[in-house]
Image (cartoon, helix red, strand yellow):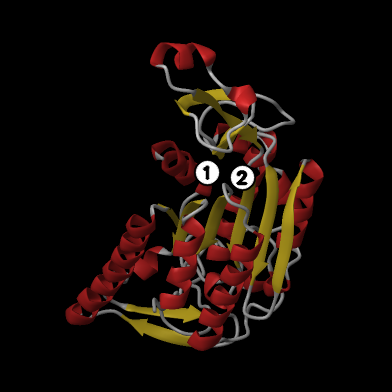
Amino acid sequence: MIPPFGHSRPFYTRPASVPADLPNQDDGVVRISLSSLIALHHAAESLPLKPGRIRSPVSGGYRSPFKGRGMEFDEVRPYMQGDDVRSLDWRVTARTGRPHTKLFREERERAVLLWVDLRHAMFFATKGAFKAVRAAQAAALLGWRAVAQSDRLGALLFSEETHIELRPRRGKAALLHVLSRIADHPAWQHRAAGSDALAAASALNQTLVRLRRVAQPGSLIILLSDFAYINGQGSAHLGQLARHNDLILADIHDPLEAELPPPGHYRVSDGERFLTLATEDPHLRERYRQGFIRRQTALQQLCRRYGMTLLPLTTSADPLAALQQGLGLR
């Protein structure tokens, strides 16, 4: 099981330029608004979200792994009992003396599913914006790009208390519905409540079970999370999903989770409580750094094992550049 940094309740350090009442601000740092997600429309045009080009805005622009009678010729193979005799390739049959049949690869629509983690550990940052904010922004960018490519868009939004399932649908209206449900999710209003490791792991596993139920083979599934408390059961669910779908794991972390700040004493808060973080001990600093490396190595090994793409995002950087680079490398 991979735990998040620090305490069970989300903490942040407040930059000097941010007002003292930061937890109540709707400024894109600790929460998100529907208007800000809609405003990402034009920025999403630069994302390389699909291989190849769209051949038809209605019938779909992706070659299906299922072979049959369709729009695009795929191959010729020896005739097998049960094949449609109308598909016989008479030229190859005459040349080889054995019956051969043509196979076609159908063009199908692709479903894009956004899996957005809004558990308590996602409401944390020391730089930039909360991990939950970055997840929402990345989801909006990917959603706009998917709609522009005539993909069907759906989403699973979850916290420890609430699971919202939105089935894939086509069109801008489907995207706006997804964005509004992200912006209005109850987790934004109740982020100060604590949760234990068991509840966090249970919420993750439950939503992966739901994801396996709604994901049709051939879907593109993008998981936006810090993957805190993912355990063996969660890893197994991901492996099953990866057998028939294309999975991208967008791993969101804060710089403080990778390495402690320079030696000193730092005051941190979740908006209700305050504590002092002491970072002078070099052995503590090294153990902390190695813990993050082990966590990242575990995620990398998981992705290699099941053929998934790992895409790192940070709270301190605009997600657009990271998505452009990561999706381009795919």
Expressed as whole percent of the image width and height from the top left, the position of residue 51 reads 50, 33
Between 128 and 187, the one nearer to me in the picture: 187
Q: Is residue 120 above or below residue 51?
A: below
Between 302 and 68, the one nearer to me in the picture: 68
Quadrant of the rendered structure where residue 229 is?
Answer: bottom left
Q: CA distance from mark 2 to mark 1?
A: 7 Å
User: In the orientation shown, which residue stands out farthest toward the front?
Assistant: 97
Tell me the quarter of the image containing the N terminus: bottom left
- Residue type (three-letter) at the residue carrying disc 2: Leu
Check disc 2: other Cα within 10 Å, few if <14, some if 14-19, many if 20+. Answer: many
Expressed as whole percent of the image width and height from the top left, the position of residue 74 reads 51, 26
Q: Which residue is mark 1?
A: 320
Report the disc number at residue 141: 2
Helix, strand or loop for disc 1: helix
Expressed as whole percent of the image width and height from the top left, the position of residue 61 reads 62, 31
Helix, strand or loop for disc 2: helix
Check disc 1: other Cα within 10 Å, few if <14, some if 14-19, many if 20+. Answer: many
Expressed as whole percent of the image width and height from the top left, the position of residue 157 reads 66, 65
x 53%, y 78%: residue: 10
Tell me the quarter of the image containing the C terminus: top left
Q: Is residue 312 above or below residue 103?
A: below
Between 235 and 93, the one nearer to me in the picture: 93
User: Is residue 319 among the parts visible in the rendering?
Assistant: yes
Quadrant of the rendered structure where residue 171 is?
Answer: top right
Quadrant of the rendered structure where residue 172 is?
Answer: top right
Report the disc number at residue 214: none
Q: Is residue 71 above or below residue 221?
A: above
* Callouts 2 and 1 close, C-beta under 8 Å: yes
